[in-house]
C-alpha cells in the first residue's frame, strides 16, 4: 500500500477526532478542562481508559517481547489486578471525601506545601518521560511505514502529530478526552482482534492449536522461578501491584478521568470494569505476540522486539489488514499523549502555579494562562521525543517501566507516609528526601554486582525507592500533637 494512501487515512482519522472534539467542547471552561465538570459517564471513562492504560507501547512492545520473555508479562498482569482493587477501595474513597481536583492536594492537606509540590513535581517528571517514550515509539513506526516514503523528516512528523493533539484538546480537556479516548480504544481493540483473527487464518490454526505450538516453541511460558532473576514471578506480581497503585492511583492523568465521574460508587465500578477488560485485552496482546513469532519464520521475517509487529503486517499482510493496523496504531498513539498533556497542564496550573487560589486572575486570564501552559508542554513533548529518537532502544516498554521505578517511587513514599502515619514533617526537608531516594536507587542499581552478588534488581526497584522515601520522611518527622479524625485533616507544621 502506498504511503500517500496511508497518509490520507491518517488525516481522515484526525478529522473524525476533530469533529468529536468540536461537539464535546461547546461551552467548555476550566472545570470542563480539568475534571469534565464532574459529569462523565463511568462506562465511557472505563472503556476509554483502556486505551490510555495500554498506549502504543503496549500495542507494539508487549507482542514484540514474547520472543524473549514468552508470556512473562502475565506475571505483571496478576499484580495489576491486585493493584486496581487497592486503588478502588483505598485511594478513591480518600479522593472523593476531599473532593479533589488535583490528587496531589491531599499531600498539601496532610503533609504540607513542599510535600505537595514535590508530589506534583515528580508526577510532571514521571508523565513527561513516560508519555514521550510512548509517543516516540508510535511516531517511529508511523515514520517508517508512511512518512519516510514521502520524504518527511522525523521532527516534522512529531511536530504535526503534537499539533493535531493540541487542536482537539486545547478547548475541552477532560470533557473532550473522555469521548475521544472511547473512540480510539474501540479502534485499537478492533485492530488487535482483527490481526489475531487474520494470523490464525494464515497459519490455519485454531486457538488451542496455536497455544500448543507456542508451548512447544517456548513462547507461552509464564512463570520465572529463579529468585535472582529480574523476571522472578514474585517480584513481577508485587511490582505489578505497586505499578498500578502508583501509575494509576497516584497519577493525575489517570485519576483526573476517574474522579470526573459524579459518585464514588460509579468511579469504583469504572476502575473494576477497566481491570476486567485489561485482563482480556493484555491476554490477547500476548497471544498476538505468539502468533507473530509463529508466522515470522513462515514469511521469512527476521525482525524481533518492537519491530516484528509492523514488519509482519506492513510487509506480508493484505492492504485491508494494513489499514486496520494503521488505524489501531494511531488509536494507540493519541490516548497516551492527549491525556498526558492535559493532565500535565492541569497539575502545573493547579499545583505549581496555584491558578485556582489566585484571586487576582479573572476567569478569562485563567483560561489564557492554562492555554499557554498547554502549548508549552506540547513544545516540551517535541523536545523529549527527539531525545528518545537520538537514544533509541529495542524495547520501549522496558524503558518506560524502568523510568517509572525512579519517578513514581517518591510518590509512593509520600502517599504511604501520609496514609499510614499521623506524624508531622519538617516540611522544608521533604525535597531533600524525595530527590535523594532516587539517587540512592541509581547508585544501588549501578553497583548491584558488588553489593547484591548474583541477585539482579528488576521492577521491585520502585518499592525500594518508595521505602527509602518513607524512611527518610520518618526520619524528618515527629509525633503528631493530636491524631486526625480522618486522613484529610491537616496536622503538619513547617519547622
Image (cartoon, grey):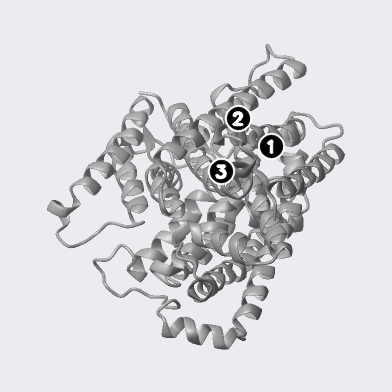
Q: Quadrant of the N terminus?
A: bottom right
Residue 51 shown left or right of residue 28 in the figure: left
* Quadrant of res 24: top right
243 or 133, which is in the foreground? Answer: 133
Disc 2: CA contacts within 10 A as few (<14), some (14-19) or many (>=20): many
Q: Position of residue 226 (x, y in %)?
A: 26, 72
| Residue at (48, 63) in percent of width and height | 64
Query: On screen, 239 above or below 132?
Result: below
Q: Which residue is mark 1?
A: 165
Q: Which residue is mark 3?
A: 135
Of callouts 1 and 2, the N-terminal one: 1
Query: On screen, 468 above or below 87?
Result: above
Q: Which residue is mark 2?
A: 378
| Residue at (58, 52) in percent of width and height | 56
For the residues marked 3 and 2, what is the alpha-carbon distance in whole angstroms? 12 Å
Q: Quadrant of the C terminus?
A: top left
Answer whether residue 124 is visible to the viewer in this image: no
Amino acid at each position: 500500500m502506498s504511503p500517500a494512501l496511508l497518509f490520507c487515512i491518517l488525516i481522515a482519522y484526525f478529522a473524525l477526532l476533530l469533529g468529536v472534539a468540536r461537539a464535546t467542547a461547546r461551552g467548555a471552561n476550566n472545570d470542563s478542562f480539568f475534571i469534565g465538570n464532574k459529569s462523565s459517564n463511568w462506562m465511557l471513562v472505563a472503556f476509554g481508559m483502556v486505551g490510555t492504560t495500554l498506549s502504543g507501547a503496549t500495542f507494539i512492545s508487549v507482542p514484540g517481547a514474547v520472543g524473549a520473555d514468552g508470556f512473562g508479562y502475565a506475571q505483571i498482569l496478576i499484580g495489576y489486578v491486585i493493584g486496581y482493587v487497592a486503588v478502588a477501595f483505598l485511594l478513591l474513597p480518600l479522593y472523593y471525601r476531599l473532593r479533589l481536583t488535583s490528587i496531589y492536594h491531599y499531600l498539601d492537606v496532610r503533609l504540607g506545601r513542599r510535600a505537595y509540590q514535590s508530589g506534583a513535581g515528580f508526577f510532571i517528571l514521571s508523565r513527561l518521560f513516560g508519555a514521550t517514550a510512548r509517543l516516540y515509539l508510535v511516531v517511529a513506526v508511523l515514520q517508517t511505514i508512511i512518512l519516510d516514503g514521502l520524504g518527511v523528516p522525523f521532527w516534522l512528523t512529531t511536530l504535526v502529530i503534537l499539533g493535531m493533539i493540541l487542536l482537539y484538546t486545547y478547548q475541552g480537556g477532560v470533557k473532550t478526552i473522555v469521548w475521544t479516548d472511547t473512540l480510539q480504544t474501540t479502534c485499537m481493540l478492533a485492530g488487535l482482534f482483527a490481526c489475531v483473527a487474520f494470523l490464525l487464518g494464515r497459519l490455519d490454526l485454531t486457538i488451542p492449536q496455536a497455544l500448543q505450538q507456542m508451548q512447544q516453541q517456548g513462547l507461552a511460558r509464564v512463570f520465572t522461578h529463579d529468585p535472582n532473576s529480574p523476571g522472578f514471578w514474585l517480584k513481577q506480581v508485587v511490582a505489578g501491584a505497586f505499578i498500578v497503585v502508583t501509575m494509576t492511583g497516584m497519577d493525575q492523568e489517570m485519576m483526573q478521568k476517574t474522579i470526573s465521574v459524579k459518585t464514588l460508587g460509579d468511579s469504583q465500578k469504572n476502575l473494576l470494569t477497566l481491570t476486567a477488560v485489561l485482563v482480556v485485552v493484555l491476554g490477547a496482546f500476548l497471544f498476538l505476540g505468539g502468533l507473530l513469532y509463529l508466522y515470522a519464520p513462515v514469511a521469512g521475517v527476521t525482525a524481533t522486539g518492537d519491530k516484528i509487529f509492523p514488519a509482519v503486517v506492513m510487509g506480508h499482510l493484505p492492504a485491508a489488514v494494513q489499514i486496520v493496523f494503521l488505524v489501531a496504531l494511531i488509536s494507540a498513539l493519541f490516548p497516551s499523549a492527549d491525556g498526558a498533556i492535559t493532565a500535565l497542564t492541569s497539575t502545573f496550573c493547579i499545583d505549581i502555579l496555584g491558578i485556582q487560589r489566585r484571586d487576582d486572575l479573572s476567569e478569562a486570564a485563567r483560561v489564557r494562562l492554562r492555554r499557554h501552559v498547554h502549548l508549552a508542554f506540547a513544545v516540551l513533548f517535541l523536545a523529549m521525543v527527539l531525545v528518545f529518537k537520538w537514544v533509541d532502544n529495542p524495547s520501549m516498554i522496558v524503558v518506560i517501566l524502568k523510568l517509572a521505578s525512579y519517578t513514581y517511587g517518591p510518590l509512593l513514599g509520600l502517599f504511604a507516609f501520609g496514609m499510614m502515619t499521623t506524624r508531622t514533617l519538617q516540611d522544608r526537608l521533604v525535597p531533600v528526601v524525595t530527590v535523594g531516594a532516587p539517587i540512592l536507587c541509581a547508585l544501588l542499581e549501578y553497583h548491584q554486582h558488588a553489593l547484591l552478588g548474583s541477585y539482579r534488581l528488576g521492577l521491585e526497584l520502585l518499592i525500594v525507592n518508595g521505602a527509602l522515601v518513607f524512611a527518610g520522611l520518618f526520619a524528618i518527622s515527629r509525633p503528631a500533637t493530636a491524631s486526625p479524625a480522618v486522613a484529610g485533616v491537616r496536622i503538619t507544621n513547617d519547622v
